[in-house]
Image (tube, rainbow, N blue to C red):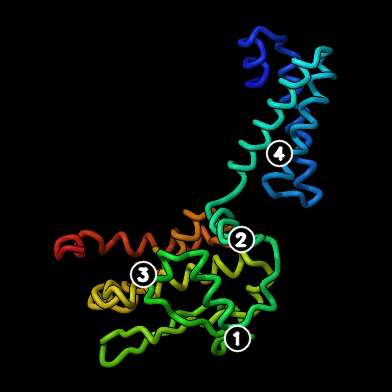
Amino acid sequence: MAQGVFSAVRGGDFWQGAAAGFVSSLGGSAAGGLGITDFMGTVAITSAMGGLGSVIGGAKSSENILFGIVAGAMVGALNFEENHSLLDKAIEAAGFDPNASAADWSNDDIKNNIANILPSLYNEAGSPSFEKMDVIGNDPTIEGQANATNNNGTITSKGVIYIKTSTMDRIDHLVSTAGHELIHMADYVSGRFQLWYSFGSNVAKAFTESRAYGWEISMGSPYAMQGNYSAYTSIANKFKSSLFQIGE
């Protein structure tokens, strides 16, 4: 509809523009289904399909067909922007494909690549190292763990994050897990966790988990657990007024 209106506004035919938008949108969806998800590939296909759509809609002049191509390019660019999460964009900006495997990354590779993908968060967390493990502790469901020591109630970061190797099936899975754990590590380094811990270990866990799951959700991670976020946030909200009174 939008492309039809644009066509009419420029003095062209509404249906030619609408057809260009419709067919290019179908082309973009088909491209995604075929695994073509990069910007240039998406736009190239939607541009071609936009030109085809305008012809189907009745365009005969080169000017109107060109408008269809431009309309298709616009559809592809906007859809790419809408469908790519902040997590994907951060990964792509560092030169990686979010869908690619990270299975061959060493511990140093994980550290260096996460530092490039999430530089601000990595620095906030104190630039920790990473260690990949098939199983973390005795719980096969744990995908990551930010390590800290508890010395009579004093919480100190150990500067190392464990990563379960199964999360390395895709780079976006690894980055989502690493980012979640970096939030925990940043809470240790900043002293936030220590403050929350003074209200009880369950309170500290609720606050840091709410932040970590909230980060994944804000980044558009497909691995974010909305249920866990809601549960921890509900607990944390009960203590926010008390924390606010002491300046948190």
**How far apart are the alpha carbons under marks 3 and 1?**
24 Å
Q: Regarding mark 3 in the picture, which secondary structure is present there?
A: helix
Nearer the viewer's eye, disc 2 or disc 1?
2
Relative vertical location of residue 215 with respect to residue 151 in this rendering, above or below:
above
Q: Is residue 245 left or right of 21 when viewed as pictured?
A: left
Which amino acid type is marked by label 4? Val
| Residue tagged 1 | 133
| Residue displayed at 54% across by 85% down | 131
Indicate the position of residue 217 as horizontal and vertical percent values.
Answer: 49, 56
| Residue tagged 2 | 95
| Residue tagged 4 | 43
Q: Are marks 3 and 1 in contact (CB under 8 Å)?
A: no
Q: Regarding mark 1 in the picture, which secondary structure is present there?
A: strand
Q: Is residue 68 left or right of 231 when viewed as pictured?
A: right
| Residue tagged 3 | 124
Which amino acid type is marked by label 1? Met
Which amino acid type is marked by label 3? Glu
Task: Name the N-terminal-most of marks 2 and 3.
Answer: 2
Q: Regarding mark 4 in the picture, which secondary structure is present there?
A: helix
**How far apart are the alpha carbons under marks 2 and 1?**
25 Å
Q: Residue furthest bottom?
A: 151
| Residue displayed at 71% across by 49% down | 37
Q: Quadrant of residue 110?
A: bottom right
